[in-house]
Amino acid sequence: MKICLLPGDGIGPEITESALRVLEKLGEFETEEQLIGGAAIDATGNPLPQETIDACKRSDAVLLAAVGGPKWDTTDPSAPRPEQGLLGIRKELGLFANLRPVRPVPALYDSSPLRRDRIEGTDLIVVRELTGGIYFGERGRNGDSAYDTCIYSVAEIERIARVAFKTARAKVISVDKANVLESSRLWREVVMRVHSEEFPFVKLEHMLVDNAAMQLVNAPRHFDTILTENMFGDILSDEAAMLTGSIGMLPSASLGEDGPGLFEPVHGSAPDIAGTGKANPLAMLGSVAMMLRHGFSLESEASALESAIDRALEEGLRTPDLGGEATTEDAVQAVLSNL
């Protein structure tokens, strides 16, 4: 079982090291490390070198930590940006479906900015389309104006809708802006057809994105599976992450029709705490669990790791983002002791 490791920037190398230590306890894996993001720009001038692409394609799974940081921020449209590496590798691997589970751990209910009675029992997943929409449409500058184009095809919507319906336990809430956007009207039409023709036994509900943003805060238990396009999913999944008390707690999986999946924490590179030992590695370890489950079909190992994370939190583990003082090392040791 071969894993391509992409530590990236900021706290990325630290949480990647945490993941490696946990993987050593769960099985025998062959690993290969490659550059991406800002680290790749510094070394090669390219946020996604060809060597990295080739290594990912010959692996069984890709584990990515984080990319980006103020060092590479620029308003120059021709300058390379770390995020181009992330978008590029998703495109190169054909990863069109991003799965982000959101399940507040009972031990952390009081860490959430929402009241316990609001989040108790929340267990949802965001299924976000990854390779279309405004992030990949035509863009440019024209005099003193700029434009970004949102484009979706029927085929792109069909395949992500199928992932959501297959993932759902009982209900899919498809999020769009069909009252304004033509691309959203097509989205809604296609989702309704896929539902009626292939998944009539799953309940389907439509929700405008602005209302969805409100309801995630007001009534998160109402959601089971959220199906949405690229930019809306990017925003809503980060909002949903805060239900858990910290974006440092959320894992994710990006999957395609074949080839390796890519597994990464939802949080960013947190350059302000890089090298301080304060990084919360639990989202990275949760991403390892998703890799074990979706990348290698190792359900027992995935469940064991998720249980170890939950138990560590129940026993009082709290990193700074959760209001405590535990270090990255403390968190790794707590999880290992429960494996």
Image: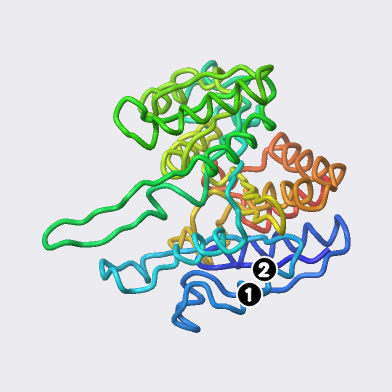
Say if mark 2 contacts mark 1, CB within 8 Å: yes
Residue that appears at 26% across and 61% down: 140
Vertical order, 310 against 336 (above or below) = above
Quadrant location of residue 72? bottom left
Crowdedness near tag 2: few (<14), some (14–19) or many (≥20) residues, C-alpha within 10 Å: many
CA distance for labels 2 and 1: 9 Å
In this image, 271 relative to 148: left or right?
right
Nearest-to-viewer mark from 2 and 1: 2
Quadrant location of residue 29? bottom right
Front residue of this view, candidates 281 and 89: 89
Amino acid on which the number 1 mark rests in the picture: Gln
In this image, 37 relative to 258: left or right?
left
Do we see residue 225 in this rendering? yes
Q: Which mark is residue 34?
A: 1
Q: Which mark is residue 307?
A: none
Q: Which residue is mark 2?
A: 56
The quadrant of the picture occupied by the N terminus is: bottom right
Q: How is the image coloured?
A: rainbow
* Percent coordinates x, y for residue 221 in the rendering: 56, 19
Residue that appears at 42% across and 40% down: 235
* Percent coordinates x, y for residue 308 in the rendering: 78, 42
Amino acid on which the number 2 mark rests in the picture: Cys
* Percent coordinates x, y for residue 51 in the rendering: 61, 79
Crowdedness near tag 1: few (<14), some (14–19) or many (≥20) residues, C-alpha within 10 Å: some
Mark 1: secondary structure: loop
Mark 2: secondary structure: helix
Q: Earlier in the sequence, mark 2 or mark 1?
A: 1
Vertical order, 275 against 123 (above or below) = below
